[in-house]
Amino acid sequence: MGEAKEEKKLSIPEYFMLGAKKGFYITVELIAPAMVMAYVIIMFLQLSGLMPLIGAALGPVMGIFGLPGEASVVLLAAFFAKAAGAATAASMYAAGVLTAEEATILFPACITMGTLVGHFARIVLVCNVRPLYYPVLLATPLIDAVIVMFLTRFVLAFYL
């Protein structure tokens, strides 16, 4: 008959260090690579001259939200990482591509929809969710992002 191992009770500093270690791991292994990938995509689009073409092509769609077509690149970056979307919006604001109002409309969408690819892979695929539900699980954050952009634009209309 085996004896149960007695678990060592951790002190508060040990819990803190354990949490810090996990947070560091998440940042280095999960968040940073997604942000770098999004940054590379954005820089490629800018340096290759594709950004104006994207802006022209998606201008009518993004115009529904009061945004220029180039704002779609922010949502593309957020698709990979929330922070990448927010950083892209901030850099586009700093470059004069977006106004403060436009960046504000995009930010909640980045948070609502952000990191869709990573979350889908880490949660849905790992949990063996039936493929039948994939479209709904992918569409829900996108629909939420559309709703929050409309709501943010509506709220800003009263304050600006």
Image (cartoon, helix red, strand yellow):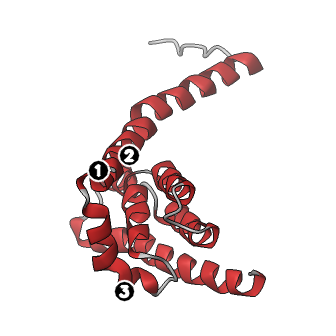
Which residue carries the number 3 mark?
Answer: 60
| Residue identified by numbered label 1 | 47
Disc assigned to residue 110: none
State the image coordinates of residue 42 (x, y, percent, origin top left): 35, 52
Circle nearer the N terminus (3, 1): 1
Q: Residue at x 61, y 82 (%)?
A: 153
Distance from Cα at disc 2 to Cα at disc 3: 25 Å
Separation of marks 2 and 1 at Cα, in angstroms: 12 Å
Return the disc, 2 or 3, that comes first in the chain's sequence. Answer: 2
Query: In what element is the residue under mark 2?
Result: helix
Determine which quarter of the picture holds residue 29.
top left
Q: Position of residue 109 (x, y in %)?
A: 52, 68
Please name the amino acid that badge 1 sits on: Leu
Q: Position of residue 158 (x, y in %)?
A: 75, 87
Q: Where on the picture, by quarter, is residue 139?
A: bottom left
The residue sitting at 26% across, 59% down in the picture is 49
Q: Which residue is mark 2?
A: 39
Give, as a three-letter code, the residue at label 3: Pro
x 41%, y 72%: residue: 142
Front position in the image: 119 or 80: 80
- Residue 11, can we see it? no
- In the picture shown, does residue 9 fall above or below 46? above
Q: Earlier in the sequence, mark 2 or mark 1?
A: 2
Q: Please state which of the two labelled residues, at mark 2 or mark 1, is closer to the viewer.
A: 1
